[in-house]
């Protein structure tokens, strides 16, 4: 895999002897251990955190990520990449969008690994929760403004605009709305109506042609018969997906209609009749987009898949071979219990004593090397001072200086290699302890995570779920291979028996 190295060393770092060369060597050693090929170096030495993303090197890095020239970026610590959490999340989103990884050596985060990706899922969820808490205070004023008929944000629906705080017909858009109703009542077909509007040169607000979906949404709006609906939906935060609020929060007020109530009712009656002939499948997510897609293994050896029945509101997984069935909400409930089980009994997870011993030995060796490095530098300074004062002749100075110089160079090469070996062990073994430490956070956050965020968590911590006739067995990553955490089984009919948790290294 082709990767890049990001170098930005603060004054404090350099004071501790962490030079740009040291950081580069450490990153290169880490890449070597991961068998990655370093193809780019982004040197931002001396660039302040405030201006970091405006720097030409930073822009070059982002361009390389977008173009796929690098698939991971290695850097010393998060603080050297971004100035605050907001900026860090923006960078993280950019990398995720382009399927690239971030590697922070100091924090032992490697998003090319499941544990690293899980970390960013949790950080993103916490940030989303914080944003929602802040926006809640602003949102509290929206129902009040809606009841007063005031603008609650945006330009108003197509066909209207705000003038002196009132929603009134837009003279350039209102005729298009009226024509759309007239055409649809005549044809009864959305696509035909769209084509005629296009032929007549009538477009939406953004000068785009009308599509059947957007046209149906527009013709279904009650505002055109004079009833404006407000405070009825909220964004999920991605500016694309919206969900309806409870009907008790909806607010209605009167505006000047663009079509008669009779015409509006006639149009929407056509939609109702069409819907009765073609059941709506939109309540069921697309195949492959379910919470446990691809993870459920039946006792007969086959996989379980979702059967998208029209009336199904909760996805149901079924085995085509033996007809075993189970609802997603049941699995989710037991998975949530499984996360709690990890928190309750972390001592049962065991430990890789050999790796812990190796890590401790390398850390102790690193500390000794750093102390020796300071000692060697002090001795060199003393020698130079004595030579400057002519207390030593050239031969005597060279005889005592050369061994110190060679040792200094040796230490300079050995420290980043040792640091990289420590980074490698920590980033590869962080998953086990990270799941234990963060399971409490995941358990408490679960209810506020979006469906997509839950998918990400499930994907990063579960290898599979074995579905028996009356049991579920969760096989987790990160914990030493196949060590049972708790005995027993969890039935998918809702009994109180405990789930079996297994672990598997990734």
Image (cartoon, rainbow, N blue to C red):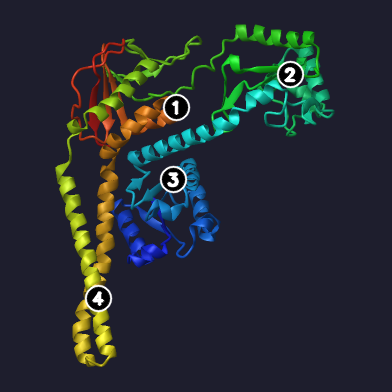
Q: Kindly report which numbered mark, 4 or 2, lies closer to the viewer in this rendering.
A: 4
Give the label on residue 223, or none. 2
> CA separation, marks 4 and 3?
43 Å
Q: Earlier in the sequence, mark 1 or mark 3?
A: 3
Do labels 4 and 2 touch, CB within 8 Å?
A: no
Q: Secondary structure at mark 1?
A: helix
> CA separation, marks 4 and 1?
56 Å
Mark 2 surroundings: few (<14), some (14-19) or many (≥20) residues within 10 A: many
Q: 356 or 204, which is in the foreground?
A: 356
> Quick check: can you spot residue 156?
yes
> CA separation, marks 1 and 2?
33 Å
> CA separation, marks 2 and 3?
45 Å
The x and y percentages for residue 2 are: 40, 52
The x and y percentages for residue 82 are: 46, 52
Q: Earlier in the sequence, mark 2 or mark 3?
A: 3
Q: Which residue is mark 3?
A: 100
Q: Which residue is mark 1?
A: 448
Do labels 4 and 1 touch, CB within 8 Å?
A: no
Q: Which residue is mark 4?
A: 378
Give the quarter of the image for residue 23: bottom left
Q: Kindly report which numbered mark, 2 or 3, lies closer to the viewer in this rendering.
A: 2
Left or right side of 51 for 144: right
| Image position of 119 with respect to 397: above or below | above
Q: Residue at x 48, y 50 (%)?
A: 65
| Image position of 291 with respect to 347: above or below | above
Q: Earlier in the sequence, mark 4 or mark 2?
A: 2
Give the quarter of the image for residue 214: top right
Q: Secondary structure at mark 2?
A: helix
The x and y percentages for residue 421 are: 25, 54
> CA separation, marks 4 and 2?
80 Å
Left or right side of 266 for 234: left
């Amino acid at each position: 895999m082709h990767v890049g190295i990001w170098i930005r060393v603060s004054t404090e770092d350099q004071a501790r002897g962490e030079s740009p060369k040291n950081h580069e060597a450490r990153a290169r050693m880490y890449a070597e251990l991961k068998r990655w090929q370093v193809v780019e170096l982004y040197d931002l030495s001396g660039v302040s955190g405030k201006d970091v993303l405006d720097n030409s090197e930073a822009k070059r890095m982002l361009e390389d990520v977008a173009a796929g020239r690098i698939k991971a970026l290695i850097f010393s610590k998060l603080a050297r990449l971004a100035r605050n959490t907001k900026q860090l999340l923006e960078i993280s989103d950019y990398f995720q969008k382009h399927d690239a990884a971030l590697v922070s050596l100091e924090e032992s985060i490697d998003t090319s690994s499941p544990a690293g990706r899980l970390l960013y899922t949790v950080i993103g969820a916490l940030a989303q929760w914080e944003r929602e808490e802040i926006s809640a205070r602003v949102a509290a004023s929206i129902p009040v403004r809606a009841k007063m008929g005031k603008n609650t944000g945006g330009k108003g629906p197509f066909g209207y605009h705000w003038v002196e705080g009132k929603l009134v017909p837009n003279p350039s858009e209102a005729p298009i709305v009226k024509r759309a109703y007239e055409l649809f009542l005549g044809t009864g077909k959305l696509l035909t109506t769209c084509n005629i509007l296009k032929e007549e040169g009538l477009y939406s607000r953004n000068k785009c042609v009308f599509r059947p979906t957007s046209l149906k949404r527009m013709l279904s709006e009650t505002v055109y018969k004079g009833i404006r609906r407000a405070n009825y939906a909220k964004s999920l935060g991605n500016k694309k997906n919206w969900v309806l609020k409870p009907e008790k929060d909806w607010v209605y007020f009167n505006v000047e209609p663009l079509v008669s109530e009779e015409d509006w009712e006639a149009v929407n009656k056509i939609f109702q009749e069409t819907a009765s002939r073609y059941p709506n499948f939109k309540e069921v997510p697309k195949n492959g987009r379910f919470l446990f897609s691809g993870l459920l293994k039946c006792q007969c050896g086959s996989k379980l898949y979702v059967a998208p029945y029209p009336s199904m509101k909760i996805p149901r997984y079924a085995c085509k071979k033996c007809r075993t069935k189970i609802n997603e909400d049941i699995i989710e409930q037991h998975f949530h219990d499984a996360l709690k089980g990890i928190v309750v009994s972390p001592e049962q997870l065991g430990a890789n004593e050999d790796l812990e011993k190796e890590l401790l030995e390398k850390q102790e060796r690193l500390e000794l090397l750093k102390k020796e490095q300071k000692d060697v530098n002090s001795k060199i300074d003393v020698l130079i001072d004595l030579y400057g004062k002519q207390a030593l002749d050239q031969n005597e100075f060279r005889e005592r200086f050369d061994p110190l110089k060679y040792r200094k160079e040796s230490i300079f090469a050995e420290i980043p290699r040792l640091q990289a070996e420590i980074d490698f062990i920590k980033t590869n073994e962080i998953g086990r302890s990270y799941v234990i430490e963060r399971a409490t956070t995941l358990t408490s956050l679960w209810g506020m995570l979006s469906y997509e965020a839950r998918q990400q968590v499930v994907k990063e911590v579960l290898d599979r779920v074995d579905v028996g006739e009356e049991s579920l067995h969760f096989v987790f990553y990160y914990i030493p291979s196949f060590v049972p955490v708790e005995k027993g089984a969890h039935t998918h009919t809702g009994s109180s028996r405990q789930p079996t948790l297994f672990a598997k290294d990734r």
